[in-house]
Amino acid sequence: QVQLVESGGGLVQPGGSLRLSCAASGTIFNDYAMAWYRQAPEKQRDLVAQITSSGSINYADSVKGRFTISRDNAKNTVSLQMNSLKPEDTGVYYCKAQLRRNGLFFDYWGQGTQVTVSS
């Protein structure tokens, strides 16, 4: 069983920065692709950034150039550095771990951390 715990959310003014972290336990972290998703009120949960087990990265267009995802396999953590935050970045941010085995995908989610961008 994989456990994911997010931290680092909070209230920040537009233009500010936050760093989210996700700590994983109960698994071989290196085998998993890790991602951050965002869910705004009354909207679907959308991919923000993903980093594969080999280090390939992709971002949602809305955060390119502002957000940076990284992983530390020695510490079993994945982080999301968020700069130049905008009110539309507000939402609950979820960490996801995905394992692919025998053609099947296994997804595990954290409980989420709230990010509010407001003046």
Image (spheres, rainbow, N blue to C red):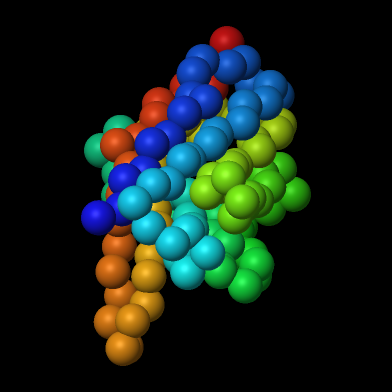
Q: Nearer the viewer, residue 110 or 29?
A: 29
Which residue is farthest top? 119
Residue at screen point 61% across, 51% down: 74
Q: Nearer the viewer, residue 70 or 64?
A: 70
Task: Examine the rendered structure and indicate whether residue 42 appears above or below residue 76.
Answer: above
Q: Nearer the viewer, residue 83 or 98?
A: 98
x and y percent of residue 70 in the render? 65, 51
Residue at screen point 28% across, 82% down: 104
Residue at screen point 58% across, 62% down: 51
x and y percent of residue 63 in the render? 62, 48
Task: Examine the rendered structure and indicate whether residue 14 appears above or below residue 43.
Answer: above
Q: Say left or right for 108 vs 56.
A: left
x and y percent of residue 92 in the render? 38, 34
Task: Examine the rendered structure and indicate whether residue 66 appears above or below residue 52.
Answer: above
Report if residue 99 is visible in the image: yes
Which residue is farthest bottom? 102
Q: Say left or right for 54 vs 22.
A: right
Q: How many marks?
A: 0
Report if residue 91 is visible in the image: no
Instruction: Locate the C terminus and report the quarter of the image it occupies.
Output: top right
Q: Quadrant of residue 77?
A: top right
Q: Say left or right for 103 vs 48.
A: left
Q: Nearer the viewer, residue 73 or 58?
A: 73
x and y percent of residue 22 in the render? 48, 40
Instruction: Locate the N terminus and report the quarter of the image it occupies.
Output: bottom left
Residue at screen point 37% across, 77% down: 100
